[in-house]
Image (tube, rainbow, N blue to C red):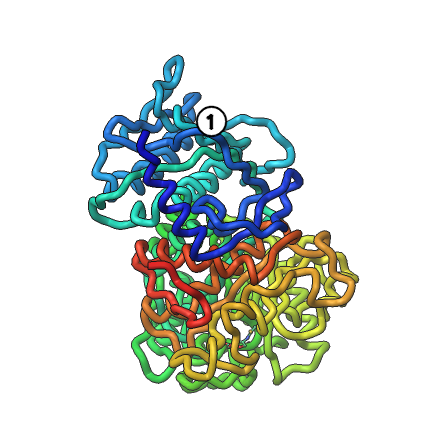
Amino acid sequence: MKPHPLLFLMLALALSSCSPNVDSSGAFTEVTPVTLQQALIPMPVSLTPGEGNPFVITAETGIYVEGDSEEVLRIAGFLADVLRPSTGYPVPVERLAGEAPAGAIVLRTGLNDATLGAEGYQLTVAETGVTLAANEPAGLFRGIQTIRQLLPPAVEQPTVQDAEWAIAPVQITDYPRYEWRGAMLDVARHFHGVDRIKRYIDLLAYHKMNRLHLHLSDDQGWRIEIKSWPKLTEIGGATAVDGDPGGFFTQEEYADFARYAAERYVTIVPEIDMPGHTNAALSSYAELNCDGVATEPYTGIEVGFSSLCVDAEITYRFVDDVVREIAAITPGPYFHIGGDEVETLTQEQYNGFVERVQDIVQSHGKIAVGWDEIAHARLLPTTLVQHWASDSAAAAIRQGARLIMSPATHAYVDMKYDDSTPLGLNWAGNTSVEDGYSWDPIDLLPGVTDENVAGVEAPLWTETIKTMEDIEFMAFPRMAGNAEIGWSPREGRSWAEYQHRLALHGARLSALGVNFYRAPEISWLP
Ligand code: TNX
């Protein structure tokens, strides 16, 4: 019998790189030659190669859904939509009546396995078929990303490819380490519209990430329509850094991409940064200023100079209107109140503002999130604190608040990779792909354990970022590292091993058309 072509691919990869084995406890410690399967990002909790011939997608392959859930049918359709363009096969999606035919891909929910949680899944690949099972639909959606990565990278191409669509036999059990695996996009410094938001959501979902935090307002721009305060977008929405064009989302556009995100099990987290970073609002409405005079629009990149008038009652009517309107179009449970870098208020004024705004957020049914600095105020037990640079994490933990870890020195994808990077800033230092991967949420701050950590988030501030190509260049490949830190077990993660998986992952990013940074220290595979 002729050796299967997949063997050649596996051999080629074995010669080019190394990766660890996964032992029964799920730890991947022992270094052996990499296979295509072990190049998954994020690395699954446990992966056991099976025996026998691979499963091959052919013109006959269909996706079958057990049970009568519309949601699972839609998820099956998502997989079919990935497979059809590149394979050129019809890939029908059907409800399963009786036994699955040989060579089928079967999706099933209702596993009832507590370790898997809402997002975990079990995947079994054999020559005779593929079974993906989960407790919840969200787990199936995460598992589908694994199926995509088990196939040749060309599966992501938008046109028909000449490839053998084979997956070697394998058994995977997988679930996330943290519930919050996020990215933040600053649409205030430069505006990035609906198409870019959707593309970013697609790329996050591909890496099993589940939060997109949008920084919707700052000194240079206000980006979300507020019907009760229309000048916010009329005046505040017109500007951007460097005098570049402004822009804003209508509420209908926001609701549209929030729905798109939800279909991919990504939660939109809206941020209105306050009391500082508010010049766009202060220039739109004179009455938000303590002296009653509207400020000039601002297009520079300094921080810390602006603040809402925290001693004026109208400020709280304003905040209440803004939070109410945004909360009403936000399906997720969170509202981010910013709170960073205020240099013009006393601590007492700042704390009083944060405490009142936190209550307003709660009154509109949302959980408050804020940057580090809010930990100096009295926090509600549900409030989340996003760590970025200061040492207020201790104050947050003392109050029982959980942390979202976005250490600027590791997780900020707006930092330059090295001195030659044309885009980005470097106030937190250059952040190589290795720096972006080689950290762990519980190693950075004293006294922090997994109990204190909701998860990980990678912010992209856009002072220098103007296009989708720019976004992709700064976010990738570092975002893949953040995705793995948020999802994969801490045990056994190492740069020495990860860089080999990343080398292959580059071929997937290329097939997805991502303008990623080809870090010279990685031996990228074509
Ligand atoms: C600090 S991080 C900021 C942002 C800037 C960013 C640039 C944080 C909470 N505030 O206003 O855009 O640095 O890297």
Whether residue 271 is visible: yes
Q: Is residue 526 above or below residue 103?
A: below
Q: Quadrant of the N terminus?
A: top left
Q: Closer to the camera, 56 or 512?
A: 56
Using the image, determine if residue 59 lies above or below residue 314.
Answer: above
Residue 380, located in which quarter of the rendered image? bottom right
Name the residue that disc number 1 marks: 108
Amino acid type at circle 1 is Arg
Q: Residue at horizontal 42%, vertical 52%? A: 13
- The location of residue 86, given as percent across then percent down, is 25, 44
Does 309 sit left or right of 265 as displayed? right
Q: Toward the viewer: 374 or 492?
A: 492
Front residue of this view, candidates 457 and 254? 457
Q: Is residue 194 shown to the viewer in this render?
A: no
Q: Whole-percent x and y of residue 148?
A: 38, 43
Dot 1 beta carbon under 8 Å from ligand 1: no
Left or right: 283 in relation to 252: right
Q: Residue at x 66, y 72 (%)?
A: 373
- 280 over 5 or under it: above or below: below
Q: Secondary structure at mark 1?
A: strand
Identify the residue shown where x is 58% and y is 50%: 488
- Residue drawn at 32 percent across, 40 percent down: 5
Between 74 and 447, the residue placed more toward the observer is: 447
Vertical placement of residue 59 versus 491, above or below: above
Q: Position of residue 186 (x, y in %)?
A: 44, 69
Q: On the rendered image, what quadrant is the C terminus found in?
A: bottom left
Residue at the farthest front position? 1
Single out the residue that lies furthest toward the top. 98
The quadrant where residue 99 appears: top left
Q: Measuring from the top left, give residue 182's x and y in whole percent.
A: 52, 57
Badge 1: residue crowd in 10 Å (few <14, some 14–19, many ≥20): many
Count of numbered circles in the view: 1
